[in-house]
Image: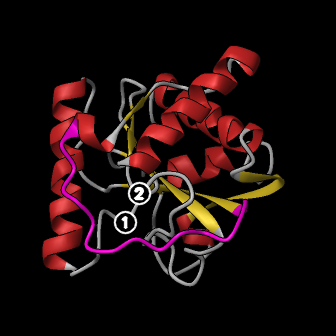
Amino acid sequence: MIAGILAVFVCLQISLVFGACPHIITRAQWGARAPKSVTHLAGPVHYSFIHHSAGAECHDRASCQAQVKSFQNYHMDTHGWSDIGYTFIIGGDGSVFEGRGWNVVGAHTLNYNSVGYGYCFIGTFTSHVPTAAAQQAVKDLIACGVAAGKIQSAYVLRGHRDMGSTECPGTAFWHLIKTWPHY
């Protein structure tokens, strides 16, 4: 919880200076369960990984929040993980939910969790891309992380499929992120 408060505080400070940080819905605000354990990152990460949830999309806070809670329950109860796997989760309305948050090792990209953050877009993006609001939210979030020293300035952006055998983040979305800076 303290990490979530600090992340929001850092983003608020940066947004006053740079205008980059989106509003982050904290774990407390979306009703997250307490993690079973937490492992902290050693310093700024080198990678930013884009994921999709491969399920239904959401376009308002209530339905997105319900999905985020279901992701956490699935990750903890079915997979036996210590917490939700993603660093942040992005809804179709551009809402950003704190998953594990800054400075915490996630469970999103096998063999790369300790060197990158995982951003999950709620929905399936095989034939279309996420909303402009959702795309802008993650771009702002990554810029915020760079400005706050959480992400290296020369970071590498990748889709989950670039690092393993998966269709994530969906073919249409993957083709789009290949045009973004740092890919």
Q: Is residue 171 left or right of residue 71?
A: right
Q: Residue at x 35, y 38 (%)?
A: 26
In this view of the protein, which residue sits in the foreground, 59 or 2? 2
Q: Position of residue 37 (x, y in %)?
A: 33, 74
Q: Residues within 10 Å of mark 2 (few under 14, many from 20)?
A: many
In this rendering, which labeled residue sits more in front, label 2 or label 1?
2
For label 1, the SS is loop
Which picture quadrant has residue 56?
top left
In the rendered image, the quadrant that contains the C terminus is bottom right
Residue span colored magenta: 30-46
Q: Please, is residue 109 above or below residue 1 in the view?
A: below
Q: Residue at x 75, y 18 (%)?
A: 17
Measure the alpha-carbon separation of dots 2 and 1: 7 Å
Q: Position of residue 89 (x, y in %)?
A: 39, 46
Residue annotated with mark 1? 85
- Tag shown at residue 100: 2
Task: Give the residue furthest to the front.
Answer: 2
For label 2, the SS is loop
Q: Amino acid at mark 2?
A: Arg
- Answer whether labels 2 and 1 touch (C-beta < 8 Å): yes
Q: Residues within 10 Å of mark 1 (few under 14, many from 20)?
A: many
Q: Is residue 19 left or right of residue 163?
A: right
Q: Decide whether residue 11 is among the magenta residues.
A: no
Q: Position of residue 176 (x, y in %)?
A: 63, 44
Along the polypeptide, which appears first: circle 2 or circle 1?
1
Q: Please, is residue 161 above or below residue 140 in the view?
A: below
Q: Please, is residue 149 above or below residue 8 in the view?
A: below
Q: Residue at x 21, y 81 (%)?
A: 80
- Tag shown at residue 35: none
Q: Residue at x 68, y 26 (%)?
A: 14
